[in-house]
Image (cartoon, rainbow, N blue to C red):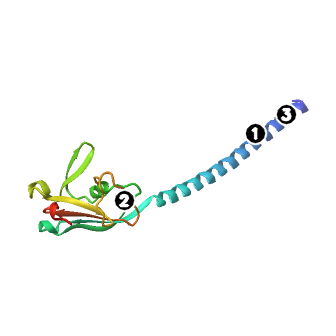
C-alpha cells in the first residue's frame, strides 16, 4: 500500500471518528434540550392545574351533604365535569346541547315535585348558563344545592 493510500485511510478514519464524536455531542446537547423541554412542560402542566372546593348539598331532601371536598383538576374543567368526577350517581338530561342535572345520588328532582331541582353556584353566584358551559378557576367554590321549590329561592 502506498504512503498516499495510508494517509487517505488515516484521514478517513480520523474524519469518521470526528463525526462520531460530534454526533455524540449533538446527542448529549439534544438530550439536555429535551430534558429542559420536559421540565418546562411539567411546570406548564402544574400551572394549568386548578384547585377548587366542590360541595353537593341535599339537606333540603332530608339527606346529608353528599360531597364536600377540595379538589385539584385541570384548567378548563367545567362545573359539570367536576360533578362527574365526584363519582356520585347522576341523572342528566342533555337536550339541545345543554346539560340539566335532574338527579344526584337518588335525589331526583323530577320525582320530587314540579318545582324541585338541582341548582349550582360558583362563588355564591348562579351563572346564567348550564353547568357544561362554566369553567372552574383556581380558588372557586362550586356548590350544588337541591331545592324542593326553586320559585321560593331569593
The N terminus - image quarter = top right
Q: Residue at x 83, y 37 (%)?
A: 11
Q: Nearer the viewer, residue 123 or 34?
A: 123
List x then y, in percent, for residue 125.
30, 64
Above or below 54: residue 102:
above
List x then y, in percent, for residue 43.
52, 60
Q: Earlier in the sequence, mark 2 or mark 3?
A: 3
Above or below 12: residue 129:
below
What is the CA distance from the residue labelled 1 to the residue labelled 2? 58 Å
Indicate which disc residue 8 carries: 3
Q: Quadrant of residue 59?
A: bottom left
Residue positioned most to the right = 3
Q: Mark 1 or 2, which is nearer the eye?
A: 2
Q: Nearer the viewer, residue 127 or 73?
A: 127
Q: Earlier in the sequence, mark 3 or mark 1?
A: 3
Q: Residue at x 64, y 49 (%)?
A: 30
2 and 3 marks in contact (CB < 8 Å): no
Q: What is the crowding at mark 3: few (fewer than 14 residues within 10 Å), some, or many (at least 20)? A: few
3 and 1 marks in contact (CB < 8 Å): no
Q: Nearer the viewer, residue 30 or 18?
A: 30
> Could you say whether the residue bearing mark 1 is in a helix, strand or loop?
helix
Q: Is residue 106 visible?
A: no
> Could you say whether the residue bearing mark 3 is in a helix, strand or loop?
helix
**To which residue does mark 1 refer?**
16
Q: Is residue 25 left or right of residue 126?
A: right
**To which residue does mark 2 refer?**
136
List x then y, in percent, for residue 130.
28, 52
Amino acid at each position: 500500500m502506498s504512503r498516499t493510500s495510508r494517509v487517505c485511510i488515516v484521514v478517513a478514519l480520523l474524519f469518521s471518528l470526528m463525526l462520531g464524536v460530534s454526533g455524540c455531542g449533538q446527542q448529549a446537547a439534544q438530550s439536555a434540550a429535551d430534558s429542559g423541554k420536559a421540565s418546562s412542560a411539567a411546570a406548564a402542566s402544574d400551572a394549568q392545574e386548578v384547585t377548587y372546593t366542590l360541595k353537593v348539598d341535599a339537606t333540603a331532601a332530608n339527606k346529608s351533604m353528599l360531597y364536600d371536598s377540595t379538589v385539584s383538576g385541570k384548567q378548563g374543567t367545567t362545573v359539570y365535569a367536576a360533578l362527574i368526577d365526584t363519582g356520585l350517581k347522576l341523572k342528566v338530561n342533555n337536550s339541545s346541547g345543554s346539560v340539566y342535572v335532574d338527579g344526584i345520588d337518588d335525589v331526583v328532582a323530577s320525582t320530587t315535585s314540579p318545582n324541585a331541582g338541582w341548582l349550582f353556584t360558583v362563588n355564591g353566584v348562579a351563572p346564567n348558563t348550564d353547568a357544561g358551559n362554566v369553567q372552574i378557576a383556581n380558588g372557586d367554590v362550586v356548590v350544588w344545592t337541591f331545592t324542593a321549590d326553586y320559585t321560593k329561592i331569593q
